[in-house]
Amino acid sequence: MFTKIDALTGQGLMRLWGVPSFPLVEGDHLLWNGVGVFVCMDFGDHVDLHMAMKPGERHRCRDAVSNVLALIGNREIHALIEEQYRRVSNLARKMGFEHECEFDGARLDGTVTNVIKMVRYV
């Protein structure tokens, strides 16, 4: 189901599959069934979760997210979602996440976008 991949491959897939300003970050980079990529960053008190799905496979997001949540286990999880992907926050809500706040976030290219912070509490 999940294959560990290196950070550079993870970053490349995030960018290729819809998150064009995703930075090279430390964390667990996981490929889900060849069509989804997750980056899990453990901060001790919570895990930041980032994801992207291959175009044409986004109908499988619910299964992919269910699998990664089971892998992470009973931890607080934060998901940062750019406002332009608001539908992702609807999926997050269905998966037990709550809307915490919105803020302006800077992309790698210097542009600013509104970010929705969703949290799944323990």
Image (cartoon, rainbow, N blue to C red):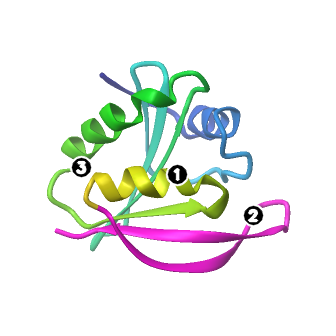
In the picture of the structure, the residue carrying the numbered disc 1 is: 87
Q: Amino acid at mark 3?
A: Ile
* CA distance separating discs 3 and 2: 27 Å
Tell me the number on the disc at residue 72. 3
Residue 3 position, x and y percent, is: 38, 25
Pick whichever, 83 or 31, lies toward us.
83
Q: Amino acid at mark 2?
A: Arg
Give whichever of discs 3 and 2 has the lower sequence position. Answer: 3
Task: Tell whether position 42 is magenta.
Answer: no
Q: Amino acid at mark 1?
A: Arg
- In the displayed structure, 23 sits above or below 100; it is above
Task: Tell whether position 108 is magenta.
Answer: yes
Mark 3 vs mark 1, foreground winner is 1
Q: Residues within 10 Å of mark 3 (few under 14, many from 20)?
A: some
Lateral position of residue 2 relative to residue 103, left or right: left
Which residue corresponds to the image point at 85% horizontal and 60% vertical from the top-left? 109
In the picture of the structure, the residue carrying the numbered disc 2 is: 107
Q: Residues in magenta?
A: 97-122
SS assignment for the magenta stretch, majority: strand
* CA distance separating discs 1 and 2: 20 Å
Residue 10 position, x and y percent, is: 56, 36
- In the displayed structure, 4 sits above or below 23; it is above
Give whichever of discs 3 and 1 has the lower sequence position. Answer: 3
